[in-house]
């Protein structure tokens, strides 16, 4: 298992609308994608692009995450952190099944089977207690695919 590109940092928020204002007005974000519901994961999501080192808009993204009604995990996170905060980090891998097998072989707790995530590609999460306290998302990005 080798560390892949940091694709995004997930930030839980009680209000995507308020967070969009923050990232636009305070942080100077110029590329904020339209929010969308991801009902199979119980969240509303909005991606904020950050510039890469060369100035192009293909750097690491911020994934704003607002719970939909009935989402217990993000709601519980926000109860502990009412203003919101960093929820997870997401790294890219070329093959999700190879990555899952590698984490499991190391004794890491993979949370569920690979499923389609907000980018439309396969993902899974690794338990934070096995990842130095950080909930870690692993996302498949095939070689040559857009980030």
Image: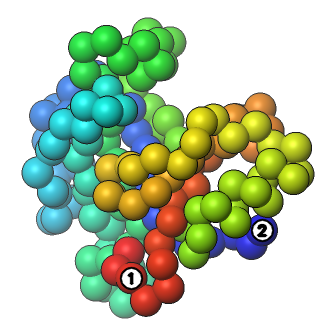
Does residue 26 appear left or right of residue 122 in this picture?
left
Indicate which disc residue 83 carries: none
Residue marked by disc 2: 1
When asked about the image quadrant of residue 121, the answer is bottom left
Q: Residue at x 74, y 72 (%)?
A: 2
Number of marks in picture: 2
State which tag comes first along the sequence, 1 or 2: 2
Is residue 25 visible in the rendered image? The answer is no
Percent across and percent down for residue 119 are: 33, 58
Vertical side of 16 occupied by 93: above or below? below
Mark 2 secondary-structure assignment? loop
Tell me the CA gap for discs 1 and 2: 20 Å
Where is the C terminus found, in terms of image quarters?
Answer: bottom left
In this rendered view, identify the residue nearer to me: 11 or 99: 99
Does residue 5 appear left or right of residue 40 in this picture?
right
Q: Residue at x 77, y 68 (%)?
A: 1
Percent across and percent down for residue 68 are: 25, 21
Label 2 neighbourhood size at 10 Å, few (<14), some (14-19), many (20+)? few
Q: Residue at x 26, y 53 (%)?
A: 47
Mark 1 secondary-structure assignment? loop
Indicate which disc residue 145 carries: 1
Q: Residue at x 48, y 38 (%)?
A: 86
Percent across and percent down for residue 17 are: 13, 34
Percent across and percent down for residue 96 are: 59, 62
């Amino acid at each position: 298992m080798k560390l892949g590109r940091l694709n995004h940092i997930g930030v839980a928020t009680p209000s995507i609308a308020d967070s969009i204002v923050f990232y636009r007005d305070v942080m100077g974000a110029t590329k904020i994608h339209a929010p969308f519901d991801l009902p199979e994961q119980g969240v509303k999501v909005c991606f904020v692009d950050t510039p890469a080192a060369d100035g192009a808009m293909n750097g690491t993204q911020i994934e704003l995450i607002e719970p939909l009604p009935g989402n217990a995990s993000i709601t519980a996170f926000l109860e502990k952190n009412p203003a919101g905060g960093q929820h997870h980090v997401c790294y890219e891998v070329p093959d999700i099944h190879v990555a899952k097998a590698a984490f499991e072989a190391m004794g890491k707790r993979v949370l569920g089977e690979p499923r389609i995530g907000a980018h439309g590609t396969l993902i899974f999460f690794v338990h934070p207690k096995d990842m130095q306290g950080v909930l870690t998302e692993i996302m498949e990005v095939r070689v040559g695919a857009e980030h």
